[in-house]
Image (cartoon, rainbow, N blue to C red):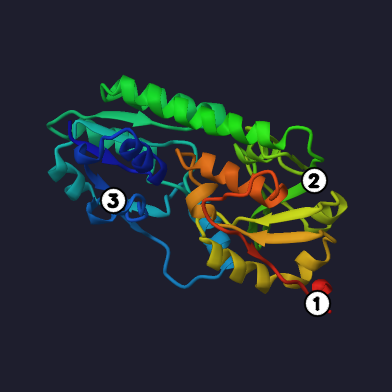
Amino acid sequence: MRIVSLVPHATELLFALGLGNEVIAVTHECDYPERALRLKHVTRDMLPAGLSAAEIDAAVRERTLKGESIYELDEQALRACKPDLIVTQALCPVCAVSHSDVVELARSIPSKPRVLALDPSTLGETLGDVRTVAQATDSRDAGVELIARIAGRIDRVKLAVRGRRRARVAALEWLDPVFVAGHWTPQLIEFAGGEDVLGFPGEHSEVVTWEAVAAAEPEVVVVMPCGYDALRAHEEAMAHSEQLAGLGARLVVAVNASAYFSRPGPRLVDGLELLAHILHPRSVAQAPEKPIAVELPAMRG
């Protein structure tokens, strides 16, 4: 089967199912696993490089209001791939090329590829996507095994933090403006032994004010700007150190959102283990990647 992935979390899932040799093209943002970096790109970014967080937000809003995607699909390259299956998503115009454009183009490709959209909003739905992709690619056994591994890791974390005091957690998906993380993140926080004081499971991420975050009285703030790694997240946190200090949290950390939180793929379970390590380091000593503690003005001696 010749597969094209038009969203990074689908690329990760396809490789996790052992289908890497059948993936022939991906997006310009597909950077995991490393083998994906060597595949043909069939998309490009429409936003200029070097924009600030506020400028990115403004540009995304402007293009979204116009019904325009922030990614451009290379139609000629996609046609040349002669795919049998195209995996994309329709939920978020920020995360992928337009679903309707993909469906329309697929109708005109001689190979008549099937278009499969993955649009999970909860952790459970991400596991459902494993089944969906496994069935579409005749990889049912691999799907069953992957789900079992993920479910086992989830259960181990929940057992490790059982009975522990639940810290009040605010997960910030963007800082200018402030976005509270929604979708699967509140569930990850709950399973990790915390209490999300602002987000709602399965709901969209929301714009709030710094005053609203402070009023929620978080004890732990996790800075996870969508699509940023830990170093870039830390830079954003330091640029907003005064606002973060005003929240009064005992701990503020920056994490690799691109790897563990922004993409609803198999590595969400790594994000769960990372959160559990942040909230209960004695109970969950291992993490896929160390968070970066953010030193705020109020914390300096």
**In 3D space, how far apart are the residues under numbered discs 1 and 2 (Cα atoms)?**
23 Å
Q: Is residue 212 left or right of residue 255?
A: right
> What residue lies at 74% left-to-right and 50% top-to-bottom?
170
Q: Amino acid at mark 3?
A: Ala
Q: What crowding class fits label 2: few (fewer than 14 Cα within 10 Å), some (14-19), or many (20 or more)?
A: some
**In 3D space, how far apart are the residues under numbered discs 2 and 3 (Cα atoms)?**
38 Å
Q: Quadrant of the N terminus?
A: top left
- The numbered dot on residue 300 is 1
Q: Is residue 85 left or right of residue 281?
A: left
Front residue (pair 179, 60): 179
In the rendered image, residue 142, in percent from the top left (x then y), is placed at: 33, 26
Which residue in the structure is indicated by mark 2? 167
Q: Is residue 4 above or below residue 155?
A: below
**In 3D space, how far apart are the residues under numbered discs 1 and 3 (Cα atoms)?**
42 Å
In the rendered image, residue 294, in percent from the top left (x then y), is placed at: 69, 67
Helix, strand or loop at mark 3:
helix
In the rendered image, residue 278, in percent from the top left (x then y), is placed at: 67, 52
Front residue (pair 123, 81): 123
